[in-house]
Image (spheres, coloured by chain):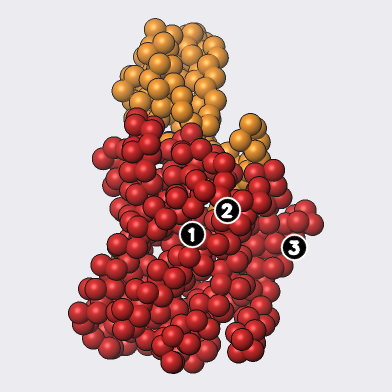
């Protein structure tokens, strides 16, 4: 317990968390501090490129084994399955309609790459190794949850969801997935030699860019919470905190069954606990326009993301360390 | 200089629906259109701003086109079919153009 509290305290005082908090406070205080859209997108591209490439280079160094394939499969299964759990929980805990509940559930089966990046940073800071291919697992887990959400809608409200070939292509080939997987593959191909070539760009500046990006995320989260105050009923808020913990349990089970390293288990737990706020909201706006975006965006960005960042990741690290003896 | 009557249609729509709207416009015989970014807004769905956005799940664009009056109804029907279930506004107004043969 003491170790967990110390971890949490260390995490809360890390630059990335403090910059996130600064963003939230600035938003609540209605400061005119803002990060231009193009800059935010540029930082997002940088983070995806860097994390993908580093993951690929790590895989090139350690080699590809059967655990990689099984991890990808496990991620795929979890991304399909977690929305079903989230949907059931929402129907019990909240008064959300089927449409809104399905839309929210889709977000929780997908992943937050920024939460993953933050967890990677914490794992590295704790001196733990992790499997480089967890980046590929992140990419695999991004899209299937959307299909689960649409299946839920089709089951309960036939005709409510709009799905066509164009949307499917957009979901499977969205920019985040393409960049993450592409950078990962290039990292695998070029290995440590390639990493050495571009290390001054993707290793040294990484933490600083992450701080700025989390400042922006704090501003966006704070603004969203301020605007959507009326949306956040107690049951929804409780779901936003409880569901990541439940999701992390699935990630823990998968990581332990696969025999992943302690760091790998932490990352799997984080992926299962996180909720999308980039790829899935865009897909939901097309496929489920009747779903209220204030609900799912406020939950994923305003509740679950800060929870994971501040308390969740240290919790997952403590539990993973305990369970793996790492 | 001689001018000709035409219709100007401006559609404010969610950014994720832009390609579907422009496809519907082209299907309705629109020869060209322009897409403008919308910086921020507010309405029944709440307030929003482009600042800090990294995805297209939020955010609106404005698609403007000029069309001959006889094609207006077909364009409005096809545009409405795209916008109907989404956040958006379709407006039409009279305008004058110099080269009617281009619209």
Residue B3 at least partly seen: yes
Q: Are marks 2 and 1 in contact (CB under 8 Å)?
A: yes
A8 horizontally vs A187: left or right? right
Q: Is residue A195 shown above or below B11?
A: below
Taking the spot 38% from the left edge, 36% from the top edge, the residue there is A156
Across and down, in percent, residue A269 comes to: 44, 73
The residue at the point 49 percent across, 20 percent down is B9
Discs 3, 2 touching: Cβ within 8 Å: no
Q: Chain of mark 3?
A: A
The mark found on residue A25 in the picture is 3
Q: Residues within 10 Å of mark 2 (few under 14, many from 20)?
A: many
Q: What is the x, y in percent for residue A169? A: 28, 47
Q: Which residue is mark 2?
A: A299
Which tag, 3 or 2, sits closer to the chain's start?
A: 3
Chain letter for mark 1: A
Q: Nearer the viewer, residue A132 or B30?
A: A132
Q: Which chain is red?
A: A
Gap in Å between the C-alphas at discs 2 and 1? 9 Å
Pointer 1: what residue?
Answer: A275
Which quadrant of the figure contains the C terminus of chain A? bottom left
Q: Marks 3 and 2, how far apart in space?
A: 18 Å
Which secondary structure lies at badge 2?
A: helix
Residue depicted at 33% across the width and 43% down the height? A151
Q: Position of residue A170 (x, y in %)?
A: 33, 47
| Nearest to the observer: residue B12 or residue A111 | A111
Chain shaded orange:
B
């Amino acid at each position: 317990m003491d170790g967990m509290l110390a971890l949490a305290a260390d995490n809360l005082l890390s630059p990335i968390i403090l910059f996130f908090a600064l963003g939230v406070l600035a938003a609540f205080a209605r400061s005119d501090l803002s990060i231009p859209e193009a800059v935010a997108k540029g930082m997002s591209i940088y983070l995806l490129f860097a994390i993908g490439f580093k993951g690929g280079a790590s895989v090139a160094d350690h080699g590809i084994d059967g655990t990689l394939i099984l991890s990808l499969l496990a991620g795929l299964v979890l991304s399909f399955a977690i929305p079903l759990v989230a949907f059931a929980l929402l129907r019990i805990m909240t008064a959300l309609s089927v449409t809104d509940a399905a839309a929210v559930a889709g977000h929780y089966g997908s992943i937050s790459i920024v939460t993953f990046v933050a967890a990677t940073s914490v794992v590295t800071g704790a001196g733990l190794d992790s499997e480089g291919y967890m980046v590929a697992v992140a990419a695999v887990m991004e899209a299937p949850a959307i299909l689960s959400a649409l299946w839920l809608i089709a089951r309960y409200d036939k005709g409510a969801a709009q799905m066509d070939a164009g949307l499917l292509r957009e979901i499977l080939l969205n920019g985040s997935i393409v960049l993450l997987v592409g950078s990962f593959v290039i990292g695998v191909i070029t290995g440590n030699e390639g990493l050495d070539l571009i290390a001054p760009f993707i290793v040294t500046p990484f933490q600083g860019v992450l701080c700025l990006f989390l400042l922006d995320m704090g501003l966006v989260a704070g603004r969203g919470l301020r605007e959507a105050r009326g949306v956040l009923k107690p049951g929804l808020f409780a779901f936003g905190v409880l569901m990541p913990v439940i999701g992390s349990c699935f990630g823990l089970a998968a990581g332990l069954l696969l025999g992943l390293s302690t760091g790998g288990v932490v990352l799997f737990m984080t992926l299962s606990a996180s909720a999308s706020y980039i790829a899935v909201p865009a897909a939901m706006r097309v496929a489920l326009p009747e779903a209220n975006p204030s609900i799912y965006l406020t939950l994923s960005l305003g509740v679950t993301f800060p929870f994971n960042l501040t308390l969740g990741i240290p919790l997952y690290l403590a539990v993973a360390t305990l369970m793996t003896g790492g | 200089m001689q001018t000709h009557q035409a219709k100007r249609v401006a559609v404010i729509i969610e950014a994720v629906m832009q390609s579907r709207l422009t496809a519907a416009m082209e299907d309705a015989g629109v020869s060209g259109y322009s897409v403008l970014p919308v910086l921020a807004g507010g309405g029944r769905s709440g307030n929003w701003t482009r600042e800090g956005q990294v995805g297209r799940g939020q955010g609106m664009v404005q698609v403007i086109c000029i069309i001959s009056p006889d094609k207006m109804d077909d364009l409005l029907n096809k545009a409405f079919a795209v916008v109907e279930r989404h956040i958006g506004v379709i407006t039409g107004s009279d305008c004058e153009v110099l080269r009617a043969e281009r619209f």
